[in-house]
Image (cartoon, rainbow, N blue to C red):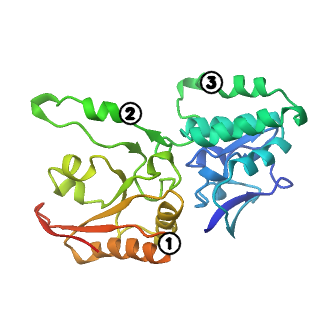
Amino acid sequence: MKRDIINIDEEKCTGCGLCVPNCHEGALQIIDGKAVLISDLMCDGLGACIGHCPEEAITIENREAQPYDEVKVIEIMVSKGFNTVVAHLKHLREHNETGFLKQGMGYLVENEENLPFSVQAVKDAVHTEPKPANGSSCGGGCPSSQTVVFNPEELKLAPKGENGSLASQLRQWPVQMHLINPLAPYFRGADLLVAADCTAFTLGDFHQNYLKDKSLVIACPKLDSGKEIYLEKLITLINEAKVNTITVLMMEVPCCGGLQQLVQMATLRASRKVPVKAITVSIRGEVLEEEWV
């Protein structure tokens, strides 16, 4: 897929660190005095960090990107040294990318004789829990977009809350389309619910009848900007994450139909075929229409 990704000019970078807290995905760190993108996988290419660089060292480049290849990435990281390798692998661990973490560590083990550092030292550093500074627990990224997978067994066994209220069926975080990483583990092979923002407030049984056993993304086709980014993410969800089905849950108001159009456009441009169900809900929470499209 062709997508935007940040590029850092090491010549211009002074290592001031102003970009780091403004990377929503926590993909930037200051290592050996320079800003480093420690993982292509987590860079959404939105460039939130650009406006915070006083040296204009960060730019956006648009290129055809191959499906994520951890072996190629770790090869690049090795050339940048021990600290960069550790930061990259920690980033994978923190975002629950256990498959890619295993591939990266596997590469290091297989090539240990050619490495300028100890693989055991890398393992120890990657699995050491850092102590939060000044009471902060955000690490280098924003909690709003840090990938979190909730325990599915807890969802199954969750008791009813006080006064008979039902437990949440949300399986992951984040959920907003701009914030999600389409290659996050909870999307792989999942049944995907693409819900208009208002539907969760309109449907009293949203969690039990629509969200349960599905991964979720939410969007507003009227108010959200950057819909071309949504389109690219949906295509990636179909082609790379290989979602099993897509259910589009939208309101009866005319502008909400843009959500279904966006999904259908993605299915036309994707190389895989995936079944799509469209559900239209009234402003009083009644299902007006439900069909496979």
Quarter assignment of residue 67: bottom right
Q: Residue 206: image x %, image y %? A: 20, 51
Identify the residue under disc 2: 151
> Along the line of sight, which residue is nearer the eye, 58 or 205?
205
Q: Can you see residue 140? A: no
State how far apart marks 3 and 1 are (Cα): 41 Å
Residue located at (67% from left, 29% from top): 126
Mark 1 lies on a secondary structure that is loop
Instruction: Please identify the quarter of the rendering in which residue 278 is found.
Output: bottom left
Image quarter of the C terminus: bottom left
- Residue 272 picture location, percent across and down: 48, 69
Q: CA distance from mark 1 to mark 2?
A: 31 Å
From the viewer's perspective, is residue 218 above or below residue 84? Answer: below
Position of residue 108 in the picture relative to residue 103 (left or right): right
Which residue lies under the disc numbered 1? 270
Query: If the image is split into quadrants, where does the N terminus sit?
Result: bottom right
Q: Which mark is residue 130?
A: 3
Identity of the residue drawn at 31% across and 30% down: 154
Question: At numbered mark 2, what does the secondary structure look like: helix, strand or loop?
Answer: loop
Real-space CA distance between mark 3 and mark 2, rounded to the nearest whole angstrom:
23 Å
Please state which of residues 161 and 236 is positioned toward the viewer in this rendering: 236
Left or right: 225 as drawn, with respect to 126: left
Q: Given the image, on which type of amino acid does mark 2 rest? A: Asn
Crowd tier of the residue under label 2, counting other residues whose Cα lies within 10 Å: few below 14, some 14–19, many 20 or above: few
Sequence-first tag of 3 and 2: 3
What residue is at 67 percent from the left and 64 percent from the top?
A: 65
Amino acid of disc 1: Ala
Q: Residue at x 74, y 40 (%)?
A: 30
Q: What's under tag 3, amino acid-wise?
A: Pro
Mark 3 residue element: loop
Q: Where does residue 77 sit, x and y in percent of width and height?
A: 78, 44
